[in-house]
């Protein structure tokens, strides 16, 4: 199993000083396999009443990991076969 680690966080800020997106970078390597991903977290990904500026590092990592998991999930048919 790949041990995927958070390797970076960057904030995208508009001309008015508002945070518009937070980028979470991940990297992992094991047994000759590797993954690198940059996930973008936007206000639409958050619970109502929460802003991007409210998020801690741990919350950014959790949101980024959820988006990464959703992005790489392979859907299954009713018979249990993958649909890729």
Image (spheres, rainbow, N blue to C red):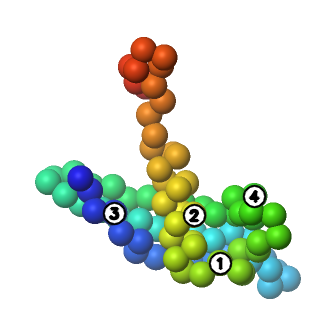
Left or right: where 57 falls relative to 43: left
From mark 3 to mark 1, how far is it between C-alphas? 21 Å
Left or right: where 9 falls relative to 84: right
**Secondary element at tag 3:** strand
**Secondary element at tag 1:** loop
From mark 3 to mark 4, how far is it between C-alphas? 25 Å
Q: Toward which corner of the image does residue 13 lie, by quadrant?
A: bottom right
Q: Say whether disc 4 or disc 1 marks the residue closer to the N-terminus.
A: 4
- Where does label 4 land, which residue? 44
Which residue is pictured at 47% across the width and 19% down the height? 77
Disc 2 crowd rating (10 Å Cα; few below 14, some 14-19, many 20+) is many
Assess whether mark 4 and mark 3 are in contact (beta carbons under 8 angstroms): no
- Where does label 2 land, which residue? 63
Disc 1 crowd rating (10 Å Cα; few below 14, some 14-19, many 20+) is some
**Secondary element at tag 4:** helix
Left or right: where 52 falls relative to 22: right
Tell me the quarter of the image containing the C terminus.
Answer: top left
Residue 11 location, x and y as percent?
63, 78
Which residue is pictured at 40% across the width and 74% down the height? 7
Q: Say whether disc 3 or disc 4 marks the residue closer to the N-terminus.
A: 3
Residue 1 location, x and y as percent?
23, 53
Left or right: where 21 falls relative to 17: left
Which residue is pictured at 15% across the width and 53% down the height? 32
- Where does label 1 land, which residue? 55
Residue 4 is tagged as 3
Assess whether mark 2 and mark 4 are in contact (beta carbons under 8 angstroms): no
Q: Say whether disc 1 or disc 2 marks the residue closer to the N-terminus.
A: 1
Which residue is pictured at 51% across the width and 70% down the height? 61
Q: Which one is nearer the viewer's eye here, 1 or 34? A: 1
Q: Which one is nearer the viewer's eye here, 17 or 73? A: 73
Q: Say whether disc 3 or disc 1 marks the residue closer to the N-terminus.
A: 3
Residue 28 location, x and y as percent?
30, 62
């Amino acid at each position: 199993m790949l041990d995927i680690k958070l390797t970076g966080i960057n904030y995208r800020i508009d001309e008015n000083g508002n945070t518009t997106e937070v980028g979470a970078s991940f990297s992992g390597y094991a047994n000759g396999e590797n993954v690198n991903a940059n996930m973008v977290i936007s206000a639409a990904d958050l619970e109502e009443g929460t802003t991007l500026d409210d998020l801690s590092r741990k919350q950014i990592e959790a949101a980024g990991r959820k988006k990464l998991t959703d992005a790489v999930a392979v859907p299954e048919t009713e018979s249990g076969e993958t649909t890729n």
